[in-house]
Amino acid sequence: MGKKAWKAYVVWILLPELAGALSGWLSRAGMKQYARELIRPPLSPPGPVFPVVWVLLYALMGVGAARVWLRGPSKARCRGMALFLAQLGFNFFWSILFFRLQAFGLALLWLAALWVLILGMLLAFRRVDRAAGWLQLPYLLWAAFAAYLNLGVWLLN
C-alpha cells in the first residue's frame, strides 16, 4: 500500500469514527437514561455491545469509502461518496433524535431513510469496487436490527 493509499484509509476511517464519537457524546445523557429507565424489546443487546459494534461498522464504512475514493474520479465514485456523506449525516443525527430528544417515532422514520441511503451507498460502492460494497452489508443489517429495536422502544414506552 502506497503512502497516498495509507493516508486515504486513515482519513476515510477517521471521518465516520469521529462523527460517531461526537454523536455519542452529544447523546450520552439520553443513553444513560435509555439504559436505566426505558423498556427495551426482546433481543436487545447489553449496553456495552453497542459501542463495539459501532466502532467496527464505522471502520468498515471507512474502508469501503477509501477503496472507492482510491479508484479515481468518475460519476460512479462521485455518487458513491455523496451517498456515503449523506448516510453519515443521517447516522449522526439518528442518535440525537433517539437518545437525546427521545423522539422515538421520528427517529424510526429517520432510520428508514438512513436504511435506504445505506442500501444506495452499498449499491453505488459495489459499482466502483465490489468489495467496498459488500463491506457495507453488516451496516445495512445492523440498521435493520436497529429499526426493530427503535420500533420496540417506541411501542413499549
Image: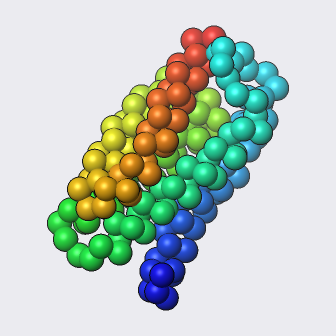
For this orientation, the residue located farthest to the bottom is: 3
Return the residue nearer the eye: 2 or 49. 2
Name the residue rendered at 59%, 41% in the picture: 95
Above or below for 89 versus 98: below
Name the residue rendered at 19%, 71% in the picture: 74
Return the residue nearer the eye: 78 or 111. 78
Residue 103 appears left or right of 8? right
Q: Quadrant of residue 46?
A: top right
Percent position (x, y) of residue 97?
55, 37
Percent position (x, y) of residue 10?
55, 74
Above or below for 141 versus 124: above
Name the residue rendered at 64%, 35% in the picture: 99
Name the residue rendered at 64%, 57% in the picture: 22
Residue 153 visible at all: yes
Quarter of the picture containing the C terminus is: top right
Percent position (x, y) of residue 119?
33, 41
Count of marks placed on residues? 0
Percent position (x, y) of residue 152?
58, 16
Residue 26 visible at all: no
Above or below for 45 versus 153: below
For this orientation, the residue located farthest to the top is: 156
